[in-house]
Image (cartoon, rainbow, N blue to C red):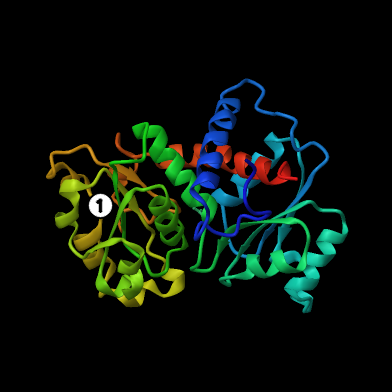
């Protein structure tokens, strides 16, 4: 069965079969990344434009690498050097890029819904690489893949997202994806950082880390998004670290080997201490590696859908 949609705009409402198909397809591409020659031909002749209107390191490089590993032709786009600066609209920019026979668009934008809008004005496949505080579907898919790879399963696991939930597109996509896959999901953070409607999504809400740590298998630690005003939501960075920082001491007190993840970029010694980020239970760099395979799977499945 092919994917149900021509686009990957979010995990909200994505069928379980689609998530399963992406995860299973990524296993084959993960194997390609271990080969001496890490390149396969399925996207030969396809052209993909990476339209990044907002900063990125991991997602941009990961998509570009995934596209090149699949033998696609790749176009890079930086908003700062484009005709947007001359007043061109997003619609005109997207339609002009498509007029050059681009098959797929990967898009990051600070406005929630921007990739959804673009998917309605062009024929090319659109992949959301992060839209404002809304969704970051490929990040969540690579997180879910990494959890499944580590534990060999998703059922019976308890995943807790910690920190700045209200500003986090990663949290939203993780919640949608994990819940669809039948995983128990909690969030933990200060009340000012947790949206009220979250319990409607079937997520348990905690405000004290020590209450959730005894039953948790994976902590997915979120960055404090100072650029989105998160600094106004708690009294000081030091206080945040004292209450919600994931430290070695706090984890050791549980007597359990809790797996730690973080989508990056990390604020070291703010939401996560450096020794935990670099420690034996951290999957942070494994997430980055798996991200290339998961994005290869998404690109491949969309490109071959028709
Ligand atoms: N995880 C993530 O989206 O990182 P970048 O902002 O560097 O792409």
Residue 124 locus on image (x, y percent): 76, 56
Classify residue 204 by image quadrant. bottom left
Residue under the image location 46 percent in, 70 percent down: 227
- Asked if the residue at label 1 sits under 8 Å from ligand 1, the reply is no
Classify residue 8 by image quadrant. bottom right
Residue 62 locus on image (x, y percent): 59, 44
Classify residue 206 by image quadrant. bottom left
Residue 295 locus on image (x, y percent): 59, 43
Q: How many marks can you see?
A: 1
Residue under the image location 30 percent in, 34 percent down: 280
Q: Is residue 126 left or right of residue 180?
A: right
For the residue labelled by badge 1, is the local secondary structure a helix, a strand or a loop? loop
- The residue that mark 1 highlights is 246
Above/below status of 217 relative to 170: above
Residue under the image location 43 percent in, 39 percent down: 146
**The N terminus: image quadrant:** top right
Q: Residue furthest top?
A: 36
The front one of 260 and 161 is: 161
Q: Residue furthest right?
A: 100
Above/below status of 248 relative to 78: above
Above/below status of 284 relative to 222: above
Residue 166 locus on image (x, y percent): 38, 70
Q: Is residue 124 left or right of residue 12?
A: right
């Amino acid at each position: 069965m092919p994917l149900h949609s021509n686009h990957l705009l979010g995990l909200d409402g994505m069928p379980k079969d689609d998530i399963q198909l992406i995860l299973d397809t990524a296993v084959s591409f993960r194997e390609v990344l271990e080969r001496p020659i890490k390149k396969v031909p399925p996207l030969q002749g396809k052209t993909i434009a990476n339209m990044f209107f907002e900063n990125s390191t991991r997602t941009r490089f990961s998509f570009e690498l995934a596209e090149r590993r699949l033998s696609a032709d790749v176009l890079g786009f930086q908003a700062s050097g484009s005709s947007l600066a001359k007043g061109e609209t997003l619609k005109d920019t997207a339609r002009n890029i498509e007029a050059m026979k681009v098959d797929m668009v990967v898009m990051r934008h600070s406005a929630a819904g921007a990739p959804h809008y673009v998917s309605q004005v062009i024929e090319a496949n659109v992949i959301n690489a992060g839209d404002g505080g809304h969704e970051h579907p490929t990040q969540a898919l690579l997180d879910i893949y990494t959890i499944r790879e580590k534990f060999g399963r998703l059922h019976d696991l308890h995943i807790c997202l910690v920190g700045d939930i209200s500003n986090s597109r990663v949290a939203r996509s993780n919640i949608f994806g994990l819940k669809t896959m039948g995983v128990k999901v909690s969030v933990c953070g200060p009340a000012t950082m947790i949206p009220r409607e979250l319990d409607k999504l079937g997520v348990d809400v905690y405000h004290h880390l020590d209450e959730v740590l005894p039953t948790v298998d994976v902590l997915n630690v979120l960055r404090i998004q100072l650029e989105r005003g998160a600094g106004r939501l708690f009294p000081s960075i030091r206080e945040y670290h004292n209450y919600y920082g994931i430290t070695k001491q706090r984890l050791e007190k549980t007597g359990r080997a809790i797996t730690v993840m973080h989508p990056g970029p990390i604020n070291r010694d703010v939401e996560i201490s450096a020794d935990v980020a670099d420690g034996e239970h951290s999957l942070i760099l494994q997430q980055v590696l798996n991200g290339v395979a998961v994005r290869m799977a998404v690109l491949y499945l969309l490109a071959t859908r028709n």
